[in-house]
Amino acid sequence: MTSLRILHLTDTHLFGDNARHYDTVDTAAQLTAALAHVAEQPCDLVVVAGDVSEDGTVESYQRARTIVGEWARERDARAVFTMGNHDRREAFREVLGGGQPDAHERVLAGTDPARPIASVTESNGWRVIVLDTSVPARGYGDIEAEQLTFLRDILATPAENGTVIVMHHAPVDAQTDLLQALALDPHDADEFIEIIAGSDVRVVLSGHYHHPIVETVNGIPVVVAPGVANIARSLDDPAEESAELAFGGAVIEIRGTRTRVVPFIERHEAALEVFRFDRETVARIIAAAGRPTP
């Protein structure tokens, strides 16, 4: 296989029961609609780049594995999942293992169920690395030193066709004040970028921001897919935060020296605002949940 096609989804925010996100959004229906929207697209990987679950229950991960896994298997593809800030490591690991449950994954060593979930697989010359940027009970992201060592050691030997990295918090800045306060630690982002520079990494797939971003870093595209549960407004006043009822994702094709990214967003016929936080509300959320200042 000299090309690789990826359906990149993120932020499914599934529940183990019939609860609704923000008391409004049926996230399982959103995920089903997103998959139906791209039903005619062939793919090799179906990636869910974090915040797989909203409630962190075993049942929510079983739902993700069923919906995404069955869709992928029908297309001879495989599903890949990574931890997000809403996910819970123990339940995630119980159902999804190291994030690549349908492959012979090599996981970050250790027996403590609360440790980061990271894994690597290689198939048909393509390597997929899953990293865990979550910080338990926090919205912002970090990459522990052991994961950076894990990444550096793996990338020391190139894969035949190249490497895809999946991580929830992107190593690029957010578009709004609230999301920047909940972004990846900038020092970890810098070290991550230093590690992948000059490597065989073809693309980095992320989520968390709920709207699309494609940024090239040292010649490597970092793709933030829009959310499945809702779509954040990215170009309004950055001191405010709001989202609408819509779903999205991206279709990515790596072929030869080219990486093609086709994001999509689909809105419902009746436009519905899921939430809107004014400046004062955003400031309070940042003070309560943002990264502490040194």
Image (spheres, grey):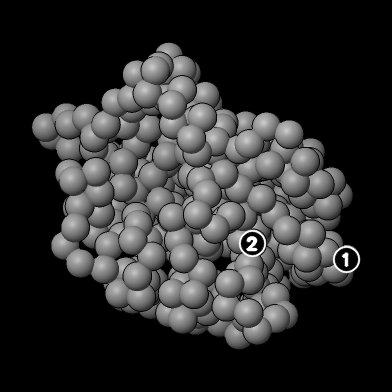
Residue 282 in picture, x, y percent from top left = 42, 25
Residue at the spot of label 1:
156
| Residue 207 location (% of width, % of height) | 50, 47
Q: Quadrant of the C terminus?
A: top right
How many marks the image carries: the answer is 2
Residue lying at 58% horizontally and 72% vertically, measured from the top left: 114
Q: Can I make out residue 36 in this image?
A: no
Q: Earlier in the sequence, mark 2 or mark 1?
A: 2
Q: Quadrant of residue 270?
A: top left
Q: Position of residue 47 (x, y in %)?
A: 48, 61
Give neighbour class at mark 1: few <14, some 14-19, many 20+ (Cα, 10 Å): few
Task: Give the side of residue 145 with respect to residue 56, left or right.
Answer: right
Q: Is residue 192 above or below residue 129?
A: above
Between tags 2 and 1, which lies in front?
A: 2
Q: Amino acid at mark 2?
A: Leu
Q: Residue at x 26, y 39 (%)?
A: 246
* 246 vs 257, nearest the viewer: 246
The numbered disc on residue 106 is none
Residue 95: quadrant of the picture: bottom left
Q: Is residue 268 left or right of residue 143?
A: left
- Which one is in front, 224 or 168? 168
Residue visible at 79% across and 59% down in the picture: 145
Question: In the figure, is residue 186 to the left or right of 168?
Answer: right
Work out whether 70 lies above or below 38: below
Look at the numbered disc 2 and give the secondary structure of its residue: loop
Q: Which residue is mark 2?
A: 131
Residue 73 in picture, x, y percent from top left: 38, 77
